[in-house]
Image (spheres, grey):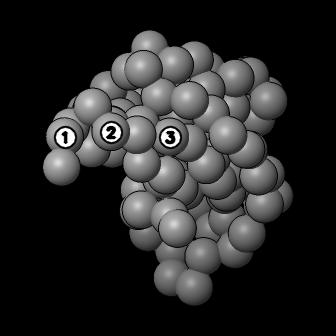
Amino acid sequence: MSNNEQRNYQATFVLDTRDITETIDEIVSRLSETLRDIDAEVVKIHNHGIKEFARTPIRGFVSAPYVQIDFKSSTEGPSTLKEKLRLDTTIDRVVVYGAN
């Protein structure tokens, strides 16, 4: 199978909007632009709103906005996306998995 073949993926982002003046829509727009920069095609964006954590990772950080983006990219897309977002302080966690 070629690396140039486009596959479907879903990325779920947990956003850390503490001390950030950007709106969630601006962050999502920036994430979409990052996906386009790695030659991925954004298919659909789901804003799941603010969800409470089962366990708080940091005292005072008990909930966060969750956003899911469905996209198509090569097999290298998920790892490239994670590397590009590694130092982004507005992204608390990102999980990318293959979709059917």
Q: Residue at x 41, y 62 (%)?
A: 97
| Residue at the limit of the structure toward the front, as seen here | 1
Viewed as shown, does residue 79 lie left or right of 35?
Answer: left
Packing grade of label 3 (10 A; few <14, some 14-19, many >=20) is many
Instruction: Identify the mark nearer the N-term, 2 or 3.
Output: 2
Residue 76 at what x, y percent from top left? 24, 38
Give whichever of 90, 81 is nearer the camera.
81
Of tags 2 and 3, which is closer to the observer?
2
Q: Residue at x 48, y 53 (%)?
A: 9
- Residue 4 placement: quadrant: top left
- The residue identified by callout 2 is 5
Q: Residue at x 67, y 40 (%)?
A: 43
Distance of mark 1 from mark 2, alpha carbons?
6 Å
Mark 2: which amino acid?
Glu
Q: SS of the residue at dot 2?
A: loop
Give whichever of 56, 94 is nearer the camera.
94
- Residue 77 placement: quadrant: top left
Give whichever of 94, 75 is nearer the camera.
75
